[in-house]
Amino acid sequence: MKLNERGLLVVISGPSGVGKGTVRRALFQMKNHDLVYYVSMTTRPKRPGEVDGEDYYFVSRETFEKRIKDNKFLEWAEFVGNYYGTPRDKVDEQLDRGKEVVLEIEVDGALQVREQMKDAVFIFIVPPGKEALYNRLKKRGTEDIEIVNQRMKKAESEFMLAHKYDYIVVNDEVTNAADRIMAIIRAEHAKTERTIHNYMKMIGE
Ligand code: 5GP
C-alpha cells in the first residue's frame, strides 16, 4: 500500500536571475522521478532559442487578460512589465493522479499559490551572494542594461521574502541545488502529516 497517494505540488521560486530555470531543468534530468512540469504563459517577447510551448506559451496581452478574467490561472503576476501565469487546468488532476507537479515561478505568484494550496512545498532558491546574481543577470546578455537593473532592483525586494518559504536552497552549483531539491521532495513524502492517514488504515486502526 502506498502511504502517500496524492502528488506533491512543489513550488520553486526565488529572485530573478538566481538560476531557477537551470536548476529545474537539472532536476528533470535526474533519474527515478515522477515529476511533471507545467509550462507557464507569458507576454514577454521570446528570447533567441526559446520555443513556444516548451519554454513558455507566448501570448499577447489581450489573450492573457482575457484568461485572467475567465479565472484560468492558478496564479499570475506582472513582472518587470510582462505577465506570467500558471494555467490552472491540469494541476489538480495531476496531483490527484499522484504526480509531483513542479512550478517555477517568481515570488508574488508563489505567495498566491501558498494561499490556495496549503499542502504544497515552497522552495526559495538563493544565489551564493548578491554579486553572483548581478553577474548572472548581466551575463545572460539577452536584455539591455535597463532591464537588468530593473530585475536587480526587483530581486533586492524579493530577497526579503525568504521567511515565507519552507526551504531555502543555495544555488552554488546547479547539480547540488537540484540534489537538495530532490532530497526535500523525498523527505516531504515521508512527513507524518502526509502519511498518517494511510498508515493508520494499513495497520487497521
Ligand atoms: P523570465 O522572463 O526570466 O523567463 O522570467 C521572469 C520571472 O518570471 C522568473 O522569476 C520566472 O521564474 C518567473 N515566472 C515564470 N513563469 C511564471 C509563472 O507562470 N508565474 C509567475 N508568477 N512567475 C513566473
Image (spheres, rainbow, N blue to C red):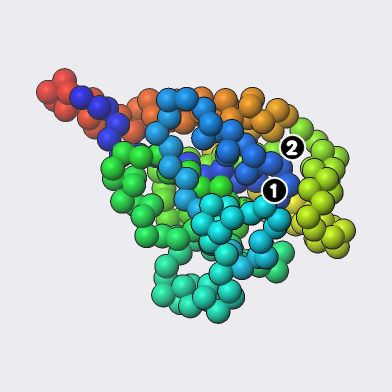
Determine whether the residue tagged by mark 2 lies in a helix, strand or loop: loop
Residue 125 in picture, x, y percent from top left? 65, 39
Image quadrant holding the C terminus, namely top left
Image coordinates of residue 164 in percent, x first then y, are 58, 45
Nearest to the observer: residue 156 or residue 51: 51
Asked if the beta carbon under badge 2 is closer than 8 A to the nearest atom of ligand 1, the reply is no
Q: Nearer the viewer, residue 28 or 68?
A: 28
Count of numbered marks? 2
Report the disc number at residue 127: 2
In this image, 144 relative to 79: left or right?
right
Q: Amino acid at mark 2?
A: Pro
Residue nearest the observer in this picture, 81 or 50: 50
Q: Residues within 10 Å of mark 1 (few under 14, many from 20)?
A: many
Q: Which residue is mark 1?
A: 15
- Badge 1 amino acid: Pro
The answer to whether the beta carbon of the residue marked 1 is less than 8 Å from any atom of ligand 1 is yes
Q: Nearer the viewer, residue 140 or 1?
A: 140
- Let me know if residue 165 appears in the view: no
What residue is rendered at 47% in x and 25% in y?
31
Residue 61 to residue 3: above or below: below
Q: Quadrant of the N terminus?
A: top left
The label on residue 26 is none
Please state the horizontal and vertical placement of residue 26, each as a whole percent of the image: 59, 33
Looking at the image, residue 203 sits to the left or right of residue 176; the answer is left
Tell me the residue at 61%/68% (across/down). Answer: 43
